[in-house]
Amino acid sequence: MLRPVAVYCLLFTLWTWCEAQSDSGTPVIQLRLAGEKRKHYEGRVEVFYNGEWGTVCDDDFSFSAAQVVCRELGFIDAESWSPSAKYGKGEGRIWLDNVHCSGGEKSLAQCESNGFGVSDCKHSEDVGVVCTQKRIPGFKFIRTQGNGEEVRSHGAVRIPITEGFLEVKDGGKWRQICNRDWTEMNSRVICGMYGFPGEKRFNTRKKNYWGFSVNCTGNEADLSDCKLGHEIELKGNSTCQEGMPVVISCIPGRAFAPSVSTGFRKAYRIEQPLVRLRGGAMIGEGRVEVLKNGEWGTVCDDNWNIRAATVVCRELGFGSAKEALTGARMGQGIGPVHMNEVECSGFEKSLTECYFNRDALGCSHEEDAAVKCNVPAMGFHNRLRLSGGRNPYEGRVEVLAERNGSLVWGTVCSESWGTMEAMVVCKQLGLGFASHAFQETWYWQGDSSADNVVMSGVRCSGTELTLDQCLHHGKHIDCPKGGGRFAAGVSCTQTAPDLVLSSQVVEQTSYLEDRPMYALQCAQEERCLSSSADKADSTSYRRLFRFSSQIHNNGQSDFRPRAGHQSWIWHECHRHFHSMEVFTHYDLLSLNGTKVAEGHKASFCLEDTHCDEGIQKRYECANFGAQGITVGCWDTYRHDIDCQWIDITDVLPGDYIFQVVINPNYEVAESDYTNNIMKCRCRYDGHRIWTYNCHIGENRNTQVTLNTKVQLNK
């Protein structure tokens, strides 16, 4: 490790351990589970207090204390606790001894004890706990920047800072590092810290050198983790004898590679990715998913560490990993768990090259691994701002644009402005997900000098890094309503819901029903039948392809309709409110993708039908109640209710594709839209119907074709 003065002088990200005291006078602490363990929800209890990690003695410890520990860590409850250093002996201080908890405390610091640091125990008495796997819905993990000083690099900010002198702050002065004994592994660590996946050779004399060499293995997450080398002999004027100052030159990932014309390189060879991130609020973070045999799956967090996380980050064109996250911190995935107990050297080109245990028995999606990567400082947030909002997470969108040779701030035309555009804005500003997209912003008084519209016709796919990467009009602005009250606005949030349809339930419940027109009057009013029903006789029958839909919220916040109670539409025939006019689309497609029949489901009732164990229902439609789907709950639309069908009266026998799309108009922001679509193969012989091979997400057949030669290494 570097000597203390250097460690404190380098910028590195760390968990926020808060101040020493809360407003109530209770010491503010941070907990973690450490030691020799297999699962993320078990381990030796360690406490961070007064700038130092320490342990807890097992004297008088109880199950109630274990419950407090687990809940403070974000788990629903405790399963057990263990005395006598079951997870190995800790180091440093034993912060707490003779702990007495009632079980209702919000923090272990609120329990009675001898006081912090007052103990007669040894580390052979360190206590451990096992928590339940399930996490508290919506539990927030807070991170901020540390108070250490920084490593800096000279350069511009509009394109990635890919090279420059390396300097450290020591004794209040910036000093360069002599390149004697400097290695490529050292450069690899620096580039990774700054968000770059690789380094290159760079072959300049200056006074005021730092008098030590640095020795990195290349796997360190931060320069402060590297070992301090020998002291370098400097001459009287502090120059580096027979050496030069260290110059770092990094290779940007494909998403950040500059080009002369657009600022972003488009010439990278497009290949089928084997690894992707899903569910993250920021660029370079998310749940790790791997493609195997044409199907995306997740990675179990057993043994998941910063080394494996860094392989993922570099593979995707980012720098080294800031964090290796466990316990489905980026939401739960779907499909199989492809990899378990991953072990990486840190130098693999892909996570699929790392050793792993193919036996994922015992791993559930509650153990999905995730990462947060270092990304280059692109200065994206300097070209966009929110103005007039009540807090930094909302406001009128204002962009920096070139007009008549000068850079000026202006507004964005709100025509066609929607959730996808708002998602790009929030991500560009580092504010997470979009919670709402606004087409009127008269209630937000923005900067009057920025009232003119400088961008119009904006259409985003949601994958863009910046708003100006979205399709939009050029210098010719087309905005009939003008700016002012009709300027675009957004509100952002750190968490979002994630709806996923159960394909298994659809397969198990699909069937045909012939139903008379006289029993379908309400459904016809709500346009749930095909157009030929408008001319049908009341004694005729319609052939309905029925099925159940079970829609889970796997995200990190509740799914709520965008419209408030006052905007819901009352339907007299069914005597219920519609909180979303179209919640799902049901389509029957030919094998070439042509639509042959369709249906839709208005969300006349969004509620918690069932929830995972330990989660309370929050939404119920009865008595004009609040509508929504709680995290960890699901809403079931049974096959026997109106409009839960596709009218196939006019469809000929044959093979088809059955498709369901949830939240098709993106009315409500989600952390992942790719899992909102389900496709099944469907065979109809004129009398019966078979539904099979249902899957969520992208077209599996396309992936199989692209991935026939790809195999994961054991």
Image (cartoon, grey):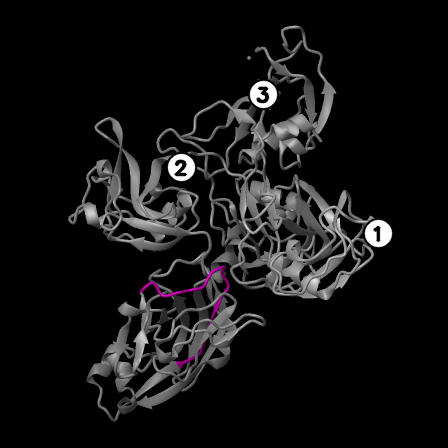
The quarter holding residue 583 reads bottom left
Residue 476 relative to residue 501: left or right:
left
Q: Position of residue 398 (x, y in %)?
A: 29, 41
Q: Which residues are magenta?
A: 546-563
- The residue most toward the left is 480
Which one is closest to the eye, mark 3 or mark 2? 3
Q: Secondary structure at mark 3?
A: loop
Q: Residue 124 got which mark?
A: 1
Residue 154 position (above or below residue 666)? above
Circle 1 packing at 10 Å, graded few (<14), some (14-19), many (20+), is some
The residue to which callout 2 is attached is 380
Residue contact at pointers 3 and 1, CB within 8 angstroms: no
Front residue of this view, candidates 404 and 116: 116
Mark 3 crowdedness (10 Å alpha carbons): few <14, some 14-19, many ≥20? few
Residue sitting at x 82%, y 50%: 121
- Say which residue label 3 marks: 172
Query: Would you say the magenta stretch is mainly helix, strand or loop?
Result: loop
Give the image location of residue 86, x and y in percent: 80, 57
